[in-house]
Image: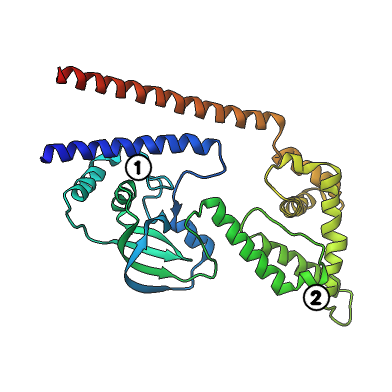
Amino acid sequence: MREILEAEAREDFNRARKNAFFSQIFTLFSSNQEGLLSLQEVREKLIPRGETYRGMKTVPLDQIVGSEGRYRDFNSQFLPRYEHLRSRWQRVDLAHLTDIILPPVTLYEVGGVYFVRDGNHRVSVARSQGVKEIDAEVVALETEIPLHGTMTRENLRKAVINHEKKLFLQRLHITEFLPEADFTVSATGRYDELEKHIHGHKYFLNECQVVEIPLEQAIKSWYANVYRPIVRIITENNLMSRFPDRTPTDLYLWIVRHWDQLKGQYGLDFPLNAAAEDYARHYGASRGHRFLRSFRLGRKILHLLLRLQRYQHRRKKRRRIKEEEGL
């Protein structure tokens, strides 16, 4: 009987690995991401305010989106990505098949979703077996940013950026002063840098004033005399085509930083237009870079197709051996 159950556990792992493989192929052609979220990465982006022990809970498995230390070993559906996981995965699966009660997993809760602290294989086996919930000991990390069960790295990045933008607009009341302005960025931490630009411009304006100017006046001056002229140069020179998936505000911040470096090398009179062109030339993606990226994607697809061919060949061979043994 045990030999039958062990064979079933092996077949369960083979099926899970096959599903993980096909999921990897699918994600090459979609915007979805393959891996789990890293708890460390989430901590760095969300900066939780504290921890609270929640005790024992029954947690929906589809709300577990990441891991503290094994996020590279499983994909976003908690399917095993590597062969070296087989031994432990099958032991956990065998316990499941023989109705052995395993200890509860331990999880971190962050913004309404969960990350595995201990029990990654148990979560993986439970999901593969169609289980909907799992018993867990939970510690909550407090954050203002809500997350959800389909959260990917891309979703997380956007959620943090949106939260930072909201705080930036609230602190400076920019929507009241500049209702038409759009300061979208593509990475976290950039609104702090943008706010420093505004306060730096305000400090510069105040040097020539007896009475300190109000923040509203400084923001409007910065927007009209600093931000908009640089964005106009970006648009007129079609520089955004060299920086796919970025925004004018991203490029504004990079060009200002680059311009300051060039002025330090060549003098304060170094022209802004030249700084923008120099930045795009050195750091923008050329046609060659875009072609190389497409070529690398093609190689990756070919590699996966070859793996699929080998997998199908091994499966046919195993089936043939079983048929011969049956004869």
Residue 283: quarter of image:
top right
Vertical comparison of 193 with 240: above or below = below
Residue drawn at 75 percent across, 40 percent down:
241
Q: Residues within 10 Å of mark 2 (few under 14, many from 20)?
A: some
Residue toward you, 197 or 55: 55
What is the residue that sits farthest to the front in this orientation? 327
Q: Is residue 270 visible?
A: no
Identified by mark 2, the residue type is Leu
Among the 4 quarters of the image, the one containing residue 295: top right
Q: Which mark is residue 80?
A: 1
Compared across the picture, whether 18 is left or right of 241 comes to left
Q: Secondary structure at mark 1?
A: loop
Which residue shows up at 74% across the image and 51% down it?
261
Which quadrant of the rendered structure holds the C terminus? top left
Query: Which residue does the numbered mark 2 point to in the structure image?
Result: 215
Residue 245: quadrant of the picture: top right
